[in-house]
Image: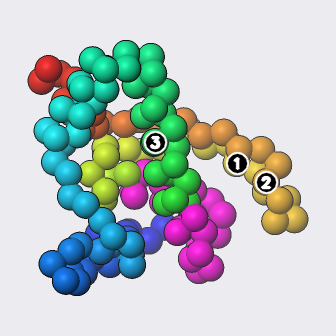
Amino acid sequence: MKTLRLHDLLNIRQENELIFANNERAVVVSTMEFGAMQSDLIENIGINRMKTFFFKYGYHLGEEDAKEVAKNRSLNMLEKIEHGPIIHALKGHAKSRITEKDFEVEDKEIKSFRFKGIWENSFEAEQHLQS
C-alpha cells in the first residue's frame, strides 16, 4: 500500500482570509477547544446524549473520508479500506492500525467484511485524562 502524506489528503488554500480544505470552507479547532465543547455538551445535555452526538459526528466524518477515498480508482477495495487508519492519523484524530482483517470479495461484490484495530494517542483520550 502507498504511504499517504498530508498533502495527498488535504489541499489547503487561503482565499479572502478564509481557509479551505479540498474546496470546502474549513475551520481550525485545537484539541483543547474541542475538549471544552465536549465538557459543555456534557453539562448541558448529559453524557449519554453527548456520546450519541459524537458517535454520529464521528460516523459522518468517516463517511466523508470514505467517499473521498472511493474516488481514487488506482486503489483496490482493500487498499481503500486500509486508508482509513492513515487518514485518522493524518487528520490528527488518533494513530490507528488494523490488527485483524477478514475481507472477501467475489465478482467485485463484498461477501464478508470484519476488521479490528487499535487506536493510540487519541486526542479525545488525552482530553479526558487532562480533565
Horizontal and vertical percent position of residue 65: 49, 60
Q: Residue at x 49, y 27 (%)?
A: 52
Q: Residue at x 71, y 44 (%)?
A: 113
In the depicted structure, whether residue 26 falls above or below residue 40: below
Q: Which residue is mark 1?
A: 103
Look at the image and tell me whether residue 108 can be seen: yes
Q: CB under 8 Å between callouts 1 and 3?
A: no
Residue 83 inside the magenta-drawn segment? yes
Q: How many marks?
A: 3
Looking at marks 1 and 3 on the same chain, the residue that comes earlier in the sequence is marked by 3
Cα separation, mark 1 vs mark 2, equals: 8 Å
Q: Is residue 63 left or right of residue 41?
A: right
Q: Position of residue 34 (x, y in %)?
A: 23, 39
Residue 57, disc:
3
Residue type at mark 3 is Tyr
Three-letter amino acid code at the position of disc 2: Ile
| Residues at discs 1 and 2 in contact (Cβ within 8 Å) | yes
